[in-house]
Amino acid sequence: MNWISCNEKLPNDKEDVLFFAYGDEIILGYYNHKLNLWFENKCFDYGIEQKKVTHWTPLIKPTLFLQP
């Protein structure tokens, strides 16, 4: 898993990713470019300030294995 610094690049708007916040939490959520806030997928009532998130990584796309 390659972590990307938020200073270098942000994910696409509302794309599900894992992000590192508060110095010790890995959270499943997304970034909203219009609001400039990160949101946790399980909690829709508040956002996390950009300055509290340092890194993010895209989710691994599942691979479909077909049996012959």
Image: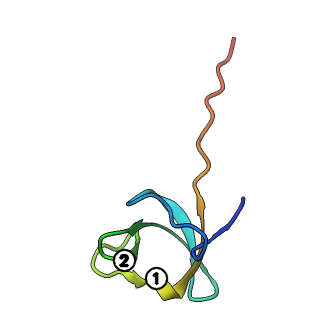
Q: Amino acid at mark 1?
A: Gln
The reply to whether callout 1 and callout 2 are in contact (CB within 8 Å) is yes
- Residue extending furthest toward the right: 1
Residue 50, numbered circle: 1
Task: Looking at the picture, tell me which residue is in the foreground, 44 or 47.
Answer: 47
Q: Residue at x 45, y 58 (%)?
A: 12
Residue 27 percent location from the top left of the image: 53, 72
Q: With 9 as the anchor, is 37 left or right in this view? A: left
User: How far is disc 1 from disc 2 in space, using C-alphas?
Assistant: 7 Å
- Residue extending furthest toward the front: 8
Q: Locate the C terminus and report the quarter of the image it occupies.
A: top right
Q: Residue at x 50, y 87 (%)?
A: 51
Q: Locate the N terminus and report the quarter of the image it occupies.
A: bottom right
Q: 10 Å neighbourhood of mark 1: few (<14), some, or many (≥20)? A: some
**SS of the residue under disc 1:** helix
Q: Residue at x 36, y 68 (%)?
A: 32
Q: Please identify the quarter of the rendering in which residue 59 is found.
A: bottom right
Residue named by callout 2? 36
Q: Please identify the quarter of the rendering in which residue 23 is found.
A: bottom right
Task: Looking at the picture, tell me which residue is in the foreground, 44 or 8.
Answer: 8
Q: Height in image: 33 above or below 49?
A: above
**SS of the residue under disc 2:** loop
Q: Amino acid at mark 2?
A: Asn
Q: Residue at x 64, y 20 (%)?
A: 66
Residue 52 percent location from the top left of the image: 51, 87
Q: Please identify the quarter of the rendering in which residue 40 is found.
A: bottom left
- Residue extending furthest toward the top: 68
